[in-house]
């Protein structure tokens, strides 16, 4: 492919992190075209993309939008670089299934995020404003009410939906842990599903309310491996009544530890490991 690859997106977006990590995995050089949230939507149309969504890539006149389509396009365009999907057909299908499921998790995490953002503007700014200079931070503060309102509508992030998403977290985290145990996720070579799923576990762990219910799990260790530094912090804003399922789940804080796997500690970061590489990239690119 000729020409420098461009990635379009905005800082702090879970799906954009997935896109970025896949480009890093392939070892591709790219320019990150940072667009302000909300403003990104008409901009993408003006740039000739068929929809308003990010992440999106453009290379050699080819435009691709959406994490799952970007993953496929990257393997097709750069088959000689580390692959995002296994070549074994059975494993490949398992990874594709986990990846598709992961996009639903991505939507759930986005809904939970906007429920939190409506309750605490600081949470919104700390995630979507992470790493911005003073002028851009001011711009983000001014944009925040509009972005929160638009995103709530666009992503159907009502309280009702957000509550259901919080209630489903134990079940969803169990599924991720099971995929890790089966080797679909968290293998020696990370794959497209790892980037889809683990980014969203990392995003959940920004929440002071939710992190204690997740951080002991293999899913959390995978999130720390894939994306050790998701910028931002979400203080305690999740209504207590939304968290009954989490509190009742086996292995949750205050519950017997019998079922709690012992693999929750972050793995040591070997020099040159994926985690160290990505942490450096994230710091320098934000
Ligand atoms: N599920 C999509 C995510 C797309 C998405 O919702 N992106 C948000 C930013 S986090 C966006 O661009 N929303 C505006 C739109 O889709 O029109 C993917 O995996 O790529």
Image (cartoon, helix red, strand yellow):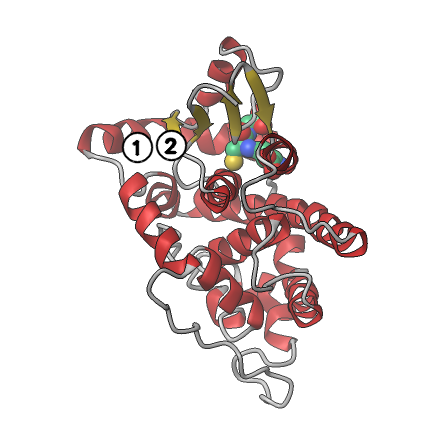
**In the rendering, at what x and y percent does residue 149 appear?**
50, 30
Q: Residue at x 57, y 66 (%)?
A: 219
Question: How far is disc 2 from disc 1 in space, using C-alphas?
Answer: 5 Å
- Position of 57 compared to 140: left or right? right
Q: Residue at x 69, y 51 (%)?
A: 86
**In the rendering, at what x and y percent does residue 270 appear?**
36, 68
- Position of 25 compared to 34: left or right? right
Q: Which residue is at the front of the view, 117 or 90?
A: 90
Q: Which residue is at the front of the view, 194 or 220?
A: 194
Q: Which residue is mark 1?
A: 141
Q: Quadrant of ligand 1?
A: top right
Q: Are marks 2 and 1 in contact (CB under 8 Å)?
A: yes
Residue 102 appears in view: yes
- Identify the secondary structure beneath mark 2: helix
Q: Which residue is mark 2?
A: 144
Q: Residue at x 53, y 23 (%)?
A: 1
Against 253, residue 133 (above or below) is above
Residue that sits furthest to the left in the current view: 134
Q: Residue at x 25, y 33 (%)?
A: 137
Mark 2 neighbour class, 10 Å CA radius: few under 14, some 14 to 19, many 20 or more: many
Q: Which residue is at the front of the view, 202 or 83?
A: 83
Against 229, residue 263 (above or below) is below
All told, the count of numbered labels is: 2
**In the rendering, at what x and y percent does residue 151 appear?**
53, 32
**In the rendering, at what x and y percent does residue 278 appear?**
39, 52
């Amino acid at each position: 492919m000729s020409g420098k690859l461009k990635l379009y997106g905005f800082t702090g977006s879970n799906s954009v992190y997935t896109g970025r990590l896949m480009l890093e995995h392939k070892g591709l050089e790219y320019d990150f075209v940072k667009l302000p949230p909300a403003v990104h939507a008409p901009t993408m149309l003006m740039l000739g993309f068929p929809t308003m969504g990010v992440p999106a890539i453009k290379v050699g006149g080819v435009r691709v939008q959406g994490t799952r389509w970007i993953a496929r396009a990257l393997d097709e365009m750069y088959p000689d670089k580390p692959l995002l999907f296994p070549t074994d057909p059975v494993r490949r299908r398992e990874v594709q299934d986990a990846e598709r499921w992961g996009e639903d998790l991505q939507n759930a995490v986005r809904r939970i995020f906007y429920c939190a953002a409506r309750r605490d503007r600081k949470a919104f700014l700390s995630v979507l404003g992470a790493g911005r200079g003073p002028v851009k931070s001011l711009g983000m503060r001014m944009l925040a009410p509009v972005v929160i309102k638009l995103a709530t509508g666009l992503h159907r992030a009502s309280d009702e939906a957000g509550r259901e998403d919080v209630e489903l977290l134990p079940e969803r985290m169990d599924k991720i842990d099971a995929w890790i145990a089966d080797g679909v996720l968290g293998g020696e070579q990370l794959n497209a599903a790892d980037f889809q799923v683990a980014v969203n576990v990392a995003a959940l762990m920004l929440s002071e309310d939710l992190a204690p219910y997740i951080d002991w799990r293999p899913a959390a260790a995978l999130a720390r491996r894939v994306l050790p530094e998701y910028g931002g912090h979400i203080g305690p804003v999740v209504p207590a009544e939304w968290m009954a399922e989490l509190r009742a789940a086996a292995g949750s804080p205050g519950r017997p530890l019998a079922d709690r796997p012992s693999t929750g500690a972050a793995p040591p970061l070997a020099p040159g490991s994926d985690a160290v590489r990505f942490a450096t990239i994230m710091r320098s690119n934000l």
